[in-house]
Amino acid sequence: MQQKLKILVTLILINYNCFAQSNSLDSINLSNCSNRGAFNLYIKKFRGEFIGGAYRNRDLTQSFSPFNLTYNIYLPFEIALNYLNNIAHDKLLKTNVVLFLHHSNYGNYAIGGGFRNSFLLFKNTYFNYQIGIAWCEVVNKKLNDGFVGMGAAFHHQISLSYFINKKIEISLNVLHLSNGNVFNSPDNLQDVIGLGITFHR
C-alpha cells in the first residue's frame, strides 16, 4: 500500500513540474493583460456628417470652384477594436456602414453607401478612409462639374478628424468620384476638398 502511495505522489510531482505553467509565465501573462484587445459590436445613436467644399472635374483647364456638399449618415452599429480592460481609451480601429449623398451646386448628384474605416493616430484624432458605390444622376448635362451621365461610380473619402468633445467631430476631407474603369457607365470624374463637421448623439 505504501509503495502504491509513493508511486502516486511521485507521478503527481512529475506532472506538476513538467506540465504546470510556471510562476514566471504567469507573471508575464499578468503584465500583458493591460495590452489585451477585443473586437466589440456597438449599437450607436444617430451620427451624421456634413462636408462642404470646392470641386474640380479633373479637367486641367478647371481649378477648384465652389461648391460641393456631401452628407454622411451612419447606420446604428459599429465594429471596434478596443482595450479589453480599459474601455476609457479611444478605440484603436472603427468600422462603420455609411449612407451618403454627394452633389454639386448645379444639382447633379450621387447617392449610395459604403464602409468607413477609422484608425487612431493619437488622442481624439483619427485617419479615416471610406469607400462606397454610388449611383450618379445628372440633372443638367450642359454644366461642367464632373458629372457626365447616369450610372454607377466609386465614391472615396479620405479624412483627418478630431473630436472636440463627445458630441462634435471636425474633419479635413478629400473626396473622389469616378467609375474606376470598372462600370460600363459614363466617365463621371470629380475631386473635392472640403471641411466637415460630425454630430454624435
Image: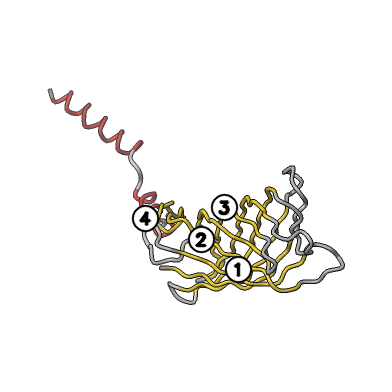
Mark 4 / mark 3, whichever is N-terminal? 4
For badge 3, the amino acid type reads: Gly
Note whether 169 is above or below 188 in the view shown: below
Q: Secondary structure at mark 3?
A: strand
Between label 3 and label 1, give the one nearer the viewer.
3
The nearer-to-camera label among 4 and 2 is: 2
Callout 1 amino acid: Leu
Question: Residue at (64%, 57%) from the top-left corner?
Answer: 110
Q: Nearer the viewer, mark 4 or mark 1?
A: 1
- The disc placed on residue 113 is 3
Pointers 1 and 2 in contact (C-beta within 8 Å)? no
Mark 1 against mark 2, which lies toward the viewer? 2
Amino acid, disc 4: Leu
Mark 1 is surrounded, within 10 Å at the Cα level, by few (under 14), some (14 to 19) or many (20 or more) other residues, namely some
Horizontal arrangement in the rendering, residue 113 relative to residue 143 (left or right): left
Quarter of the rendering occupied by the N terminus: top left
Q: Nearer the viewer, mark 4 or mark 3?
A: 3
Q: In front here: 78 or 151?
A: 151
Residue wearing tag 4: 30
> Which is nearer the N-term, disc 3 or disc 2?
2
Q: Position of residue 75 (x, y in %)?
A: 46, 55
Q: CA distance from mark 1 to mark 2?
A: 18 Å
Q: 195 left or right of 9?
A: right
Circle 2 sits on which residue? 73
- Label 2, secondary structure: give it: strand
Q: Which mark is residue 160?
A: 1
What residue do we see at 54% from left, 56% from top? 99
Bin the neighbour count of mark 4 within 10 Å (Cα to Cα): few under 14, some 14-19, many 20 and up: few
Q: Disc 4 to disc 3, how far (Cα)? A: 43 Å
